[in-house]
Amino acid sequence: MDADARSIQIDDLRAAWLSTESKALAEERIANIVDGVVVANTSDRYEFFATRRRQTQRTELRYRQRTLES
């Protein structure tokens, strides 16, 4: 994978992560990661860990419930 394709993939992942808590700034999320959402895995869908059960209608996103540590 070339650098441009990798950059686009990271940008898409960042956009997906930001959409999981659209009202919070990235800095706020990072400061409170224990109650937040973190990237779990990437493939055809983006997977995120969250401390509480979450659902989405977006087929490219999937949430898994986990206890998160700072």
Image (tube, rainbow, N blue to C red):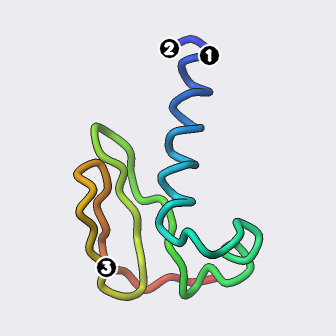
Residue 58 spot, x, y in % from top left: 27, 56
Disc 1 and disc 3: Cα gap in Å?
Answer: 32 Å
Residue that label 2 marks: 1
Is the residue marked by circle 3 packed among few (<14), some (14-19), or many (20+) residues within 10 Å?
Answer: some
Which badge, 3 or 2, comes first in the chain's sequence? 2
Q: Do the residues labelled 1 and 3 touch (CB within 8 Å)?
A: no
Which badge, 1 or 3, comes first in the chain's sequence? 1
Is the residue marked by circle 2 packed among few (<14), some (14-19), or many (20+) residues within 10 Å?
Answer: few
Q: Residue furthest top?
A: 2
Is the residue marked by circle 1 packed among few (<14), some (14-19), or many (20+) residues within 10 Å?
Answer: few
Q: What element carries label 3?
A: loop
Query: In the rendered view, would you say 34 is above or below 47?
Result: below
Q: Quadrant of residue 23?
A: bottom right
Q: Quadrant of the C terminus?
A: bottom right
Residue that label 3 marks: 54
Q: What residue type is labelled 3?
A: Arg
At 67% from the left edge and 84% from the top edge, which residue is drawn? 32
Disc 1 and disc 2: Cα gap in Å?
Answer: 8 Å
Q: Is mark 1 on a helix, strand or loop?
A: helix
Query: In the rendered view, would you say 30 is above or below 52?
Result: above
Query: Is residue 33 shown left or right of residue 40?
Result: right
Looking at the rendered image, the disc whose residue lies closer to the viewer, 3 or 2, is: 3
Residue 42 spot, x, y in % from top left: 38, 44
Looking at the rendered image, the disc whose residue lies closer to the viewer, 1 or 2, is: 1
At 50% from the left edge and 61% from the top edge, which residue is drawn? 19
Q: Quadrant of residue 28?
A: bottom right
At 30% from the left edge and 71% from the top edge, which residue is drawn? 64
Residue that label 1 marks: 4
Disc 3 and disc 2: Cα gap in Å?
Answer: 32 Å
Q: Do the residues labelled 3 and 2 touch (CB within 8 Å)?
A: no
Q: Is mark 2 on a helix, strand or loop?
A: loop
